[in-house]
Structure formats: structure tokens, C-alpha cells
Image (cartoon, rainbow, N blue to C red):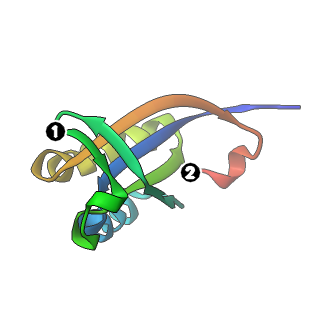
Amino acid sequence: MQLHRKKRIEIIAEAAIVPLLVEALHEAGASGYTILPALSGGGHHGAWSESAMSSAMQMQMILVIASPDLAAGIAARLQPLILQYKAILAVSDVEVIRGDHFA
């Protein structure tokens, strides 16, 4: 079995700005993404849970797998949005089996 080294980008943000983030992902050249609900957590602003929030404040996670070069471009493209809104972005190393599925 051959594994291909890629980067995993995780973005957690308020659901209201997810369309802006997805548009920026497309502009940066991402070939795909997955959006998941974020149900609860805690951090800089304290603990939170989905049940305690209005729908306008719900959080979602966007996952993207990309080549190292593309991941750097995506992070640079998303940085202004991440800094402007309630959001975080993390990039980590990952290995995938279907390397040709990810730009």
C-alpha cells in the first residue's frame, strides 16, 4: 500500500461565515471539502454548546485535504477571514491512500 503525504486543514467557524470560507477555498484552488457540525467546545471565550446558541451562532468545522503548496495558499487566502471573525484554522500532516483525489 502506498501512502501520499498531504496537509489537513481544519477550520472551525460560526456557521454564518461558512459560505464566505467555502468561496475563499474555491478561489484558492481547493478541489473539495467536508463540512461538519461542531456540537460543543471551549476556548478563548469559554465553554459553549450548540444547545445554548441560537442558529445564528452555531459552529461548523470545514475539513480540506490538499498538497503542501496548496495548503499554504489556502491558509494565506483564509487568514484575513479567520482574523476578522470568530474562527480558528489548523494545518497538520496527514497521509492518504488516494493521493490523486487531492490537489
**Dot 1 amino acid type:** His
Residue labelled with disc 1 = 45
Residue at the spot 26% in from the left edge and 50% down from the top edge:
78
SS at circle 1: loop
Residue at the spot 24% in from the left edge and 69% down from the top edge:
54
Cα gap from disc 2 to disc 1, whole angstroms:
35 Å
Quadrant, the N terminus = top right
Mark 1 residue crowding within 10 angstroms, few (<14) / some (14–19) / many (20+): few
User: How many marks on residues?
Assistant: 2
Residue at the spot 42% in from the left edge and 58% down from the top edge:
29
The image position of residue 80, as x and y in percent, is: 15, 49
Residue labelled with disc 2 = 103
Q: Give the vertical position of 72 relative to 61 (above or below).
A: above
Q: Nearer the viewer, residue 2 or 33?
A: 33
Going by the picture, which residue comes out furthest to the left?
A: 84
The image position of residue 101, as x and y in percent, is: 67, 54
Q: Which of marks 2 and 1 is nearer the N terminus?
A: 1
Q: Nearer the viewer, residue 60 or 18?
A: 60
**Looking at the image, can residue 6 be seen?**
yes
The image position of residue 55, as x and y in percent, is: 28, 72
SS at circle 2: loop
Residue at the spot 30% in from the left edge and 62% down from the top edge:
58
Q: Which mark is residue 81?
A: none
Mark 2 residue crowding within 10 angstroms, few (<14) / some (14–19) / many (20+): some
Which image quarter: residue 75? top left
The answer to whether mark 2 and mark 1 are in CB contact below 8 A is: no
